[in-house]
Amino acid sequence: MYIRNNLRWRLIWKGAWQTLLIFTAYSLLVCIIYGPLNFHSLAIPWQPVATLGIAVSFYIGFKNNGSYDRFWEGRQIWGGIVNASRTWAIQALEFVTSVVDAPNVDAPAASAAELTDRHRCLVYRHLAWCNALRLQLRRQPELWDEQVAPFLQPEESERIRRFQNPSAHLLRAQAADLRILREKRGLLNDFQHVAMMDTLEQLYTLQGGCERIKNTPFPRQYAFFSYVFVWLFSALLPLGLIGEFARMGPDHIWLTVPFAVLVSWVFNTIEVVGHTSENPFENQMNDVPMTALCRSIEIDLREMLGETTIPAKLEPINDILY
């Protein structure tokens, strides 16, 4: 996610120079054919070009609204993951505290060391879930050993990573641990068990929302025709402008180049902005900063565990927070 209030000019130029070159070359070609080659039949009336421009502006505005909605929904989902993560950690730390009055449980009182291990297991597995979900959405399974495995026991890590949907099975493992804590260790009563299962259900819902956005591409009929219409308008724009400038004098036809390039670049930029917002989980500069959010969750939860060796907050790289 780009975090500066204004884009740097080098970034604008990097994304625009190719289209500017195409628009400039095309506009110059139109001017040369109309002027030095004296082929005036190339010009077309300005009114239909202007009407097309109005239609295209409405169309790409509609498309960009849909694209932004996808990005904002993705950001809201990850905001929900941050909040649910804190809730899970609080429940793990405050519910799993001592032997409770649970029927049909014949187990010795849990020691402080056992409780610490239980807390750490539940919290660390959740951190593994956050990072595993991020890697699934970005299609980066090769980073498992570096960013997920450290939060799991080696045997559990190797078992979970073989599944098609590791994140779902990590939540399944959490549910299995809750059952053991309630039925065999007596460390959860029925109310606490239900509350923590509700949190797992919320996490499943949030994961499903991410998967829905990731696996359902933006409707191609909107995205594709937006691209086609912008380039069609850009192709007709110099043909409509050159006749208008020719009325001002034969030398004014060359003003077609800067004005046509400017208007075409504006329309194309609006279309590109919408295109880059269609898929918010691709690890691009305008996407949801899932890596930074995972690190924030890790910092909060490990501090709740009482740990002192906490990773630093991620800083933006070249004004981009990943």
Image: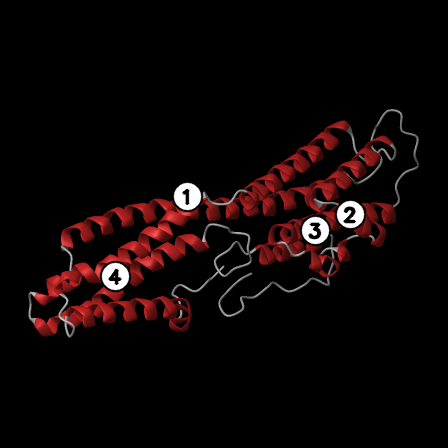
Residue that carries the numbered disc 2 in the rendered image: 160
Label 1: element kind: helix
Which circle, 3 or 4, is nearer the viewer? 4
Q: Quadrant of the C terminus?
A: bottom right
Which tag, 2 or 3, sits closer to the chain's start? 3
- Along the polypeptide, which appears first: circle 1 or circle 3? 3
Q: Which is more foreground, mark 2 or mark 3?
A: 2
Cα–Cα gap, marks 3 and 4: 48 Å
Kindly give the residue lying farthest to the top in the view shown.
103
Q: Residues within 10 Å of mark 4 (few under 14, many from 20)?
A: some
Residue that mark 3 sits on: 127
The image shows residue 264 at horizontal and vertical percentages of 28, 61
Give the mark toward the camera: 2 or 1: 1
CA–CA distance between discs 1 and 3? Answer: 39 Å
Residue type pointed to by label 1: Gln
Q: Of the residues tagged 4 and 1, which is closer to the observer?
A: 1
Q: Are marks 4 and 1 in contact (CB under 8 Å)?
A: no
Q: CA distance from mark 2 to mark 3?
A: 14 Å
